[in-house]
Image (cartoon, rainbow, N blue to C red):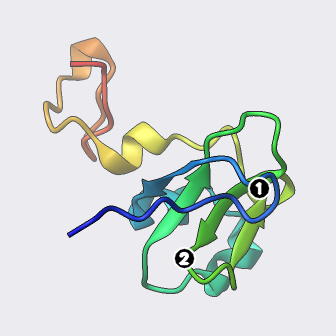
Amino acid sequence: MSLENIKCPLCKSDSNEAKNKPLRKIVREELKHLIIDESYYFCSNSICEVVFFNKDMEKIFLLEDVNLFADIDEQSGCGCNNQKNGCNKSGGCCGN
């Protein structure tokens, strides 16, 4: 099976697959209902306005659609729950 090379719909840069759970964490609250349960990709170009998009490019989230200050580590978590090193009870990551 060959890996598809998914390109950003705007700048045509390479993209990488994004996990759905962190995506839900950083998309603005009023837009979360637009996230459908499928694979999303993020643009690798740091100056592109596109942040996330689905494979069919029907759902595209731009910089203005996301909270860049969201705590993604809290959502993904390292699982150590070490309060001394900054981890929280929900499994937020402390870098371990």
Q: Is residue 94 above or below residue 47?
A: above
Residue type (three-letter) at the residue carrying disc 1: Val
Whole-percent x, y for residue 82 in the image: 17, 23
Q: In the rendered structure, are the residues bearing label 1 and label 2 in contact, judged by CB atoms less than 8 Å apart?
A: no
N-term-proximal mark, 1 vs 2? 1
Q: Is residue 39 above or below residue 87?
A: below
Whole-percent x, y for residue 22 in the image: 46, 56
Question: Could you tell me which residue is drawn at 76 percent across and 76 percent down?
Answer: 30
Q: Nearer the viewer, residue 69 or 43?
A: 43
Q: Nearer the viewer, residue 79 or 21?
A: 21
Residue type (three-letter) at the residue carrying disc 2: Lys
Question: Could you tell me which residue is drawn at 63 percent across and 77 percent down?
Answer: 32
Which label sits in the foreground, 1 or 2? Answer: 2
Number of marks drawn:
2
Q: Give the numbered dot on residue 50.
A: 1
Q: Is residue 57 above or below residue 23?
A: below
Helix, strand or loop for disc 2: loop
Label 2: which residue? 55
Q: Nearer the viewer, residue 25 or 2?
A: 2
Helix, strand or loop for disc 1: strand
